[in-house]
Amino acid sequence: MADSLVLSVSALNRYVKSVLDGDINLKTVFVKGQISNFKAHFGSGHYYMTIKDEKAQIRAAMFKNANSRLKFMPENDMSVIIRGRVTLYEQGGEYQLVIEDMQPDGTGALALAFEQLKQRLEKAEIFAEGHKKPIPQFPGKVGVITSASGAAVRDIINIVERRYPVCEIVLYPVSVQGEGSARQIAEALDYMNKNKSADVIIVGRGGGSIEDLWSFNEEEVALAVYNSEIPVISAVGHETDFTICDFAADLRAPTPSAAAELAVPSAEDMLEYFYQMKNRFYRSIDAGISQRESKVNLYSLSLKKNCPADHIESLMQRIDSLYSAIKSNAEFGMKNRESRLRELVTKLSLQNPAGILAKGYSVVTKGGKTVTRSDEVSAGDKLDIRLNEGSIKCEVIQ
């Protein structure tokens, strides 16, 4: 034991690290596995994770200088193929895999990156239909953001000049592939908006591989298109090519040539449209005049049928008829009332006391009260006797 070399933990880890780092077989290894416990360190930008299969696992790290080259974002449960080197993390005493490159297993990195960004921007409503702006019908200026030397710009210029020669073309040349091209496209969109350079903007390029078109799949281009106050037509690649820029744009054109046709109207079509409108206008005027003539004739006939003089004569006759009816009814009523009155007078006359007195009868009263029986008076009572003509005062003797 005394002859044995006693090492510190640090020294032992350092030695093991040197052994691992010195093994040529471990300097470059390719490992296939599944990601778990993934963590993107906010401060340093490094990625930390565990790579595992059904039977084992290994700690792994991917430092910022390596992960900045990734087109996709690693996620838990993702199957990947890794190129890296095996070393030891001295402080923790754990051996680990330092990842230099990573590719999705079974699908391309760019295809995965495309889907990841598409889903993220879709959740952020960058592709929302409610945000999309209408393309102006008669633009005075068409902005074109593309390569100055590509076939796309020649096609756009030729079609715009042929279809709508009064329109001005404002070209902002940019690189459409390679490093820095996405930044140039975004800056061109920003410049045209700040300077109000156009009424509508076409942004795009001709066809190519997914790598060639990748500038139009960058988030900064999508956000620049989304934030553009000027309507944007995206025309990237061929009809079967779709990019993130297409989804963010106000309108997607299958090709740059189609974008030019969508951006401006056809002068020939406009002339034909104006001719049609003129003919429709004249037909509408003729129809309106005929309709109004028919109405005038109808009103004239109606006026004759409803002439005021004829109407007044009819009313006068109606008044005369009503007057005669009222007079007749009144006379008939008066006769009925006269007959009834005579009947009442006759009845009243029959019951008049004066009539009874005229026949020789008299009325005897005592103290103002009529006497009808002999037992109502006594000897010595003073009575008043009313005759037909005059009255007699007398005294009861017996």
Image (cartoon, rainbow, N blue to C red):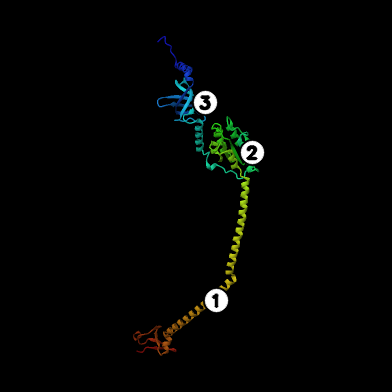
* CA–CA distance in space, label 3 to label 1: 115 Å
Residue 190 visible in image: no
Residue 66 image label = 3
Going from N to C along the chain, the mark reached first, 2 or 3, is: 3
- Which residue is disc 1 drawn over? 320
Mark 2 crowd level (few <14, some 14–19, many ≥20, 10 Å Cα): some
* Disc 1 packing (10 Å; few <14; some 14–19; many ≥20): few
Residue 32 appears in the rendering: yes
Residue matched to label 2:
170
Find numbered disc 2 in the image and state the secondary structure of the residue it sits on.
strand
Q: Furthest residue to the top?
A: 3
Q: Earlier in the sequence, mark 1 or mark 2?
A: 2
Q: Residue at x 48, y 80 (%)?
A: 332
Q: Earlier in the sequence, mark 3 or mark 1?
A: 3
Q: Amino acid at mark 3?
A: Ala
Q: Real-space Cα distance between discs 2 and 3? A: 40 Å
Residue 97 in percent (x, y) is at 47, 23
Q: Position of residue 395 (x, y in %)?
A: 38, 88
Asked if the residue under mark 3 is in contact with the one under mark 2, i.e. CB atoms within 8 Å, the reply is no
Between disc 3 and disc 1, the foreground one is 3
Furthest-left residue in this view: 375
**SS label for mark 1:** helix
Image quarter hosting the C terminus: bottom left
Q: Is residue 390 left or right of residue 208?
A: left
